[in-house]
Image (cartoon, coloured by chain):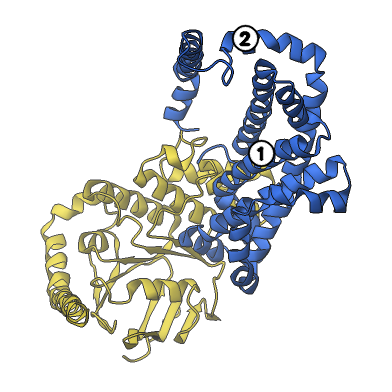
Chain colours: A blue, B yellow
Amino acid sequence: MTAATARRSRSPLPAATGIGALVAFFATMEVLVQSGMVNRFIVPPPSEIFGSFGRVIVEEHVFGRFLQTLTECLTAGVMLTVFGVAGGVLMHRFKLLQQACETWVAALASAPIVLMYPLFLVIYGRSAWTIIMMGFFAALPPVILKTIEGISGTRKVLINVGRSFNLTPSQQFWKILFPSALPTIFVGIRLGLIFALINIVGVEFLINYGGLGQLINDLAERYDLAGTYAAICFVILVSVLFFMALEKVERWLRPVD
Amino acid sequence: MAAPSSTNNAILTADHINVRFETAEGPVIAVDDVSFDVKQGEFFSVIGPSGCGKSTLFNVIGGLLSHHQGTIKVGGETISEPHKSIGMVFQEESTFPWRTVTDNVAFPLELIGMEKAQRIERAKHFIGMVGLNGFENRYPGELSGGMRQRVSLARTLASEPKILLMDEPFAALDEQTRLLLGDKVLQIQQQLKQTTLLITHNITEAVQMSDRILVMTYRPGKVKRIVDIDLPRPRTSEIVGSDAFGHYVAQIWSDLREEASRGMRDQEKHVMDEGASS
């Protein structure tokens, strides 16, 4: 961590500004909804959303659902990190494979994989694995592509340093290429987790199997708008937890950039 | 040029080195029949204008470029790939940004499997040698350009090479820092009796540090002359004000001036040709 970064991280100002901006946003929304400028049947007032938290937690068993979505995301996240990074490394290592597949992988990144849920239902049945695998496949391309980009972007002089020290190909990878590529790989994992979470909640919503996606579906069908938004807040919480954990892992693996 | 008369104490011998690159505009001879030897404990510099093949020669000696003719011998042994006897310091910033100064310097010791406590102790020795005491736990991103080059130098020294091979290591630094780092390199070289081969385009730097300077011609890079620098040792950057120093600088510049002018004319012609063809 640089001295400047350390100073930034010790200062409470950024966190306070972030919280302040959030409070200001909710206060503005409250005023807009209460004054009728925003339709309360589309966006309920924030006070009503916060008021519904207790009800959603107790009556809708939100923690069980939260844990289910979290577990599905974690499983998909671990799988996409392992297979995505390995896929990227293999594609970088074997140029023919990279030339043959990179365009297809890039195309897959923008494909609406969530629409393929009937196929996944046939393969994996109406189970958590359908949800996990859909999250996994949707999130795989950015991890593969960013891994290739990170390794390819390793500065030539660092590779030459490795060569000058007579590193074996394995040492060259683990001691130079991989640590050099880590920041870019983590960008891919972050993107992958966003794709995974969107798809996991989306498929939970569609196949009515459980988790926060199903809860949002239930609450929306009951037209419980405040409850729906409260449930969405829990989805955001899953995302926040993942990003915090990921940042810790990244700092552990590579203390500075 | 004739093969160098290998003396008994020559630790490095370059014998009839030729390097040719195929380009879109036809073959380019980057290094043309270059031969020289470097004696044990000597500070030898190779100087030439931009584009004369200095860095190509650096890569050939370091074993990073294999498609060349001629032989490189270290202690009588012909080498064709990176050799443990040659430690390289590169022109570009080459520290590992994810490692602390200590971990950067300990890198070659880690490769040979030295125990952690022992390698940290050894690394600290070399960190002290380049004058970076107190910065052991800093990361390269927290250091200046000159400090990072010293980390690279310490990392190479930690591998205890027989020959220290440097490619314009201070090229990106300002003149004052360059002179002071030159002092540091001289001090280390004299302390370790380290055989050093410096590739540079900076005449002051070459004269300040070298026992002998090989002047190269502009493309194709040939040996124009080898100049003995008979200045007293130990030297510091204070020597740059002496008459003898000025004499050597003038002498080498008179050799280089014609080559540098030729290089400049060649580059201008190249730009004109490109403009005409586009």
Q: Which mark is residue B91?
A: none
Q: Which mark is residue A48?
A: 2
Identify the residue at horizontal 79%, vertical 20% (top origin): A63
- The reply to whether residue B124 is visible in this rendering is no
- The reply to whether residue B181 is visible in this rendering is yes
Depth check: give the residue in front, A38 or A254: A38
Q: Chain of mark 2?
A: A
Q: Is residue A58 above or below residue B216?
A: above
Q: Is residue A60 left or right of residue B104?
A: right
Place of residue A140 in the rendered image (x, y in percent of width and height, measured from the top left): 68, 52
Q: Chain of mark 1?
A: A
Q: Is residue A222 left or right of residue B177?
A: right
The kind of residue tagged 1 is: Ile
Depth check: give the residue in front, A142 or B267: A142
Q: CA distance from mark 1 to mark 2?
A: 25 Å
Q: Is residue B212 left or right of residue B97?
A: left
Depth check: give the residue in front, B75 or B206: B206
Are both tags, 1 and 2, on one chain?
A: yes
Of the residues tagged 1 and 2, which is closer to the observer? 2
Place of residue B58 in the rendered image (x, y in percent of width and height, measured from the top left): 40, 71
* Quadrant into which the C terminus of chain B falls: bottom left
State how many labels appear. Answer: 2
The kind of residue tagged 2 is: Glu
Residue under pointer 1: A198
- The answer to which image quadrant residue B258 occupies is bottom left
Q: Secondary structure at mark 2?
A: helix
Place of residue A66 in the rendered image (x, y in percent of width and height, measured from the top left): 77, 25
- The answer to which image quadrant residue B9 occupies is bottom left
Q: Secondary structure at mark 1?
A: helix
Place of residue B62 in the rendered image (x, y in percent of width and height, measured from the top left): 47, 71
